[in-house]
Image: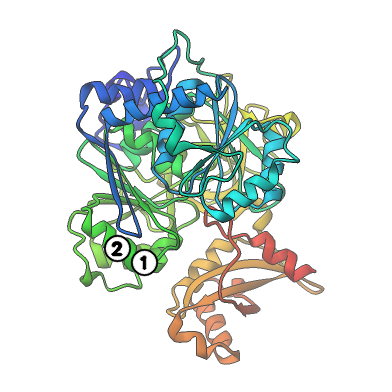
Amino acid sequence: MIEKYLKQTSFCSYEDYSEHLEFIVPDEFNFAYDVVDGWAAERPDATALLWTNDQGAEHRFSFAEMKQLTDQAAGYLNSLGIGHGDKVMLILKRRYEFWICMLALHKLGAIAIPATHMLTTHDIVYRNNRAGTKAIICVGEEYVLKQVEGSREESPTLESIISIGELVPEGFHDWQKEMPKAEPYVRPAHANSNDDTLLIYFTSGTSGEPKMVAHDHLYALGHLTTGVFWHNLSSDSIHLTVADTGWGKAAWGKLYGQWFAGATVFVYDHEKFNAKNMLAQISRYHVTSFCAPPTVYRFLIREDFADYDLSSLRYCCTAGEALNPSVYDRFLELTGIRLMEGFGQTETTMTLGTMPWMEPKPGSMGKPNAQYKIGLIRADGTPCEEGEKGEIVIHVDGKKPIGLFKEYYRDEELTAEVWHDGLYHTGDMAWRDEDGYYWFEGRIDDVIKSSGYRIGPFEVESALMTHPAVVECAITGVPDDIRGMVVKATVVLAKEWKDKAGEPLIKELQNHVKRVTAPYKYPRIIEFVDELPKTISGKIRRVEIRKRDNA
C-alpha cells in the first residue's frame, strides 16, 4: 500500500529517511476509498479492527467488512441529507461505530468533528454554533443524550441527531434500526479535492476557549509516517493506542497511519483507566505495539509485570506530553523495550520523533520528522544555537507541508498570529543538543522567571518524578514580591506515601530536587492533591493551577 504514496518505502538510517522521504500525492486523495477500500480489494479477510470492552464483548472486522459497513453508513447518512462539506459531530467514546462513521463521512466528503463524551450542553452549543454543525451522532447513554438534547434549542444549524445504543429518545434517529436498511453509497466521480476540509478538532488547549483546527484530506496521508515509521507497524501488527476518540491522538494512533501499514487497530473500550486491566488486554489479545501518554506509563510501571504475559509486545511509543526519564528507565527495566517518544500538536501530525533507526535518549522528543522542516528561534526571530532554549517552529516556504493544519476555522486573525513570515509557531519551547535531539521545556506561557533565572516546568517535574513518593506533579510559578516568581509543585502522592503528607515530606522533596538538578530550581511551595487538572487528552492544565493560586 505505501508504495503508492512514497517514492522510497524503506530506510536504513535516520539520515537516509531525512534525505529521501518523498510523498507521491494523488490528485484527489480520499483515505476511506483509497486506503481502507484498497486493502479490502488486496487483503479482504485481514483484520482491520479488533474491538473489545470492559464487559467482555468482542467484535472483529475485516477490511472487506469495513468497506461494506462504511458504504452502507455513508448511504444512510446521505439519506438524512448529509453530504459534501456538511459538519457532523461524533460523540462516540470508543464504540466501534466511531471508525465506521469517520470513514463514511470521508466517503461523503463531509467534515467530521470528533468530540468527547464529557461535554456539557454549554460545550456542545458552543461547538455547534462556532462550526455550524448539521448533525450529531452520539452514544445512546443517558448523560450524553441529555446534553445533546439540551443543545437543540440554541443550535439553529442542527438538523439531525442520531443515537447509537440502547436509548433512543423521541426525535432522535435510531442508528441500529435505520442504518442496516440503507442502500450502499457509491463513490462519485469527484468525492473531494485534497484541500477540502476533512475534519475539525476543537483543541482542548491548556488556556483559553477551544480553537477549531481544520485539516484537509492530506492530513490523513501525513500520518503515514506516524504509523509505518514511528510506530514501526506492518501488516502483522496489532496496535493499541490509548486515546479517547474525541482527542486528536485517536487520529494519530487508532486510524490513519495504522491502516496505511495494513495493521490491526486494537480498541479496548473502557469507562475508566485501570492499569491492571490494560495489561491484561495486552496479554490476552497478544498486542504487538503500544502507544500511550506518559501518564499511562507512570501507572503501568507500578504494577507487577510478572503477572502478565507480555511476550507479544515488540514496540512501544509515547506522546501527549514530555516523558520523564525515570519512567523510561523503569519501563525498560521491566520489559526490555525502549520507549520511543514523539511530539506534535492537534495542528500537526508527528513533527519530532524517535524513529526505529535511532537510539532514544530518555526524555528527548527525538529529531525532526522528515516531512517537516523544524527549527528553534529566539524571541526576536533569530535561530537558536545548540543548547539554547527557543520556540519550536515549522518552516512553511511557499508550500504547506503534508500534515500541517489548514487554518483555525473561521478565525483568520488567530491563524495569522501563529502562522506568518513563512513560519508556523508552535508555542512550545525546547532546546537541541549536539546530536540534533530536541528536549522539551514547556509552553512559552509556562516558563517561570525567578530571580533572573528562566525555569522550565518539565526539568523540575523530571527531578521530582525520580522520588518514589511522587506519582504525578505539575510545576507552576507563583508571584513573589522579592523574586518575581517562585516555583510551586502540585504533587499527587503514591498510595503508600499519602499518610506521610506534611512538612517533613515537603522538606524531603525539596532537598531531593536540589540534589537531582540545579538547586535554584527547587520548589519553594509544595501542595499535595488527589489529582491534577487535565484536558480531555490527559495534558496537565497548569493554567488552571495558576488561576486558582492567583484568585
Q: Residue furthest top?
A: 189
Q: Tell me the number on the disc at residue 536.
A: none
The residue under label 1 is 275
- Label 2 element class: helix
30 relative to 366, above or below: above
* Image location of residue 217, percent across then percent down: 49, 24
User: Residue farthest to the front?
Assistant: 170
* SS under mark 1: helix
Left or right? Give the position of 265 relative to 510. Answer: left
Question: In 3D space, how far apart are the residues under numbered discs 1 and 2 (Cα atoms)?
Answer: 6 Å
The amino acid on which the numbered mark 2 sits, given as a three-letter code, is: Leu
Q: Which residue is mark 2?
A: 279
Disc 1 + disc 2, Cβ < 8 Å: yes
Look at the picture and state if 197 lies above or below 523.
above
Quadrant of image for the N terminus: top left
> Can the viewer see residue 222?
no
| Residue 509 placement (x, y as % from top left) | 53, 81
Task: Name which residue type carries label 1.
Answer: Ala
**Left or right relative to 310: residue 67:** right
Q: Residue at x 65, y 66 (%)?
A: 476
Please give the count of numbered marks on the rendered protein: 2
Work out whether residue 352 or residue 228 is closer to the camera in this orientation and state it.
Answer: 228
**The C terminus: image quadrant:** bottom right
